[in-house]
Image (cartoon, rainbow, N blue to C red):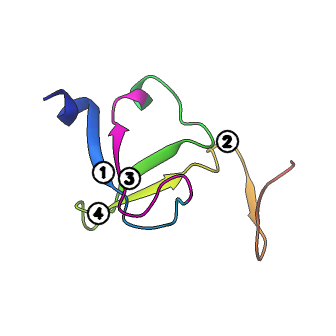
Amino acid sequence: MIIVFLYQPVKVDSTSMAPLLSDQERIFINKFVYRFEDIHRGDVVVFWYPLDRSKSFIQAVIGLPEKRWISAATALCEWGS
């Protein structure tokens, strides 16, 4: 019962997070921590695909709401850094 409310198992279905997470690896996500803490750069987050809630995306946070970013052809840079 605790797993349902606090933690959730998720299977990684791509190599976009390699080498941190491998394809087909199973991880547990903490569903409760961000009620008490802010999200920080480098955190790994899982969010559900809005059109099909059976699919999820796993990504690392690179930008925060108060930051401004510019995109070049091959790079993403924080504005003013």
Residues at marks 1 and 2, CA–CA distance in whole angstroms? 29 Å
Residues at marks 2 and 3, CA–CA distance in whole angstroms? 20 Å
The magenta stretch spans residue 12: no
Magenta residue span: 19-33
**Marks 2, 3: nearer the viewer:** 3
Sequence-wise first label, 3 or 4: 3
From the image, tell me which residue sits under label 2: 66
| Image height of 44 relative to 22, above or below | above
* Residue 47 circle label: 3
From the image, tell me which residue sits under label 4: 55
Looking at this view, is 16 or 50 the one in front?
Answer: 16
Quarter where residue 42 is shown: top right
User: Extreme right residue here?
Assistant: 80
From the image, tell me which residue sits under label 1: 10
| Image height of 29 relative to 58, above or below | above
Q: Residue at x 79, y 72 (%)?
A: 72
Cβ–Cβ below 8 Å for labels 1 and 4? Answer: no
Majority secondary structure of magenta residues? loop
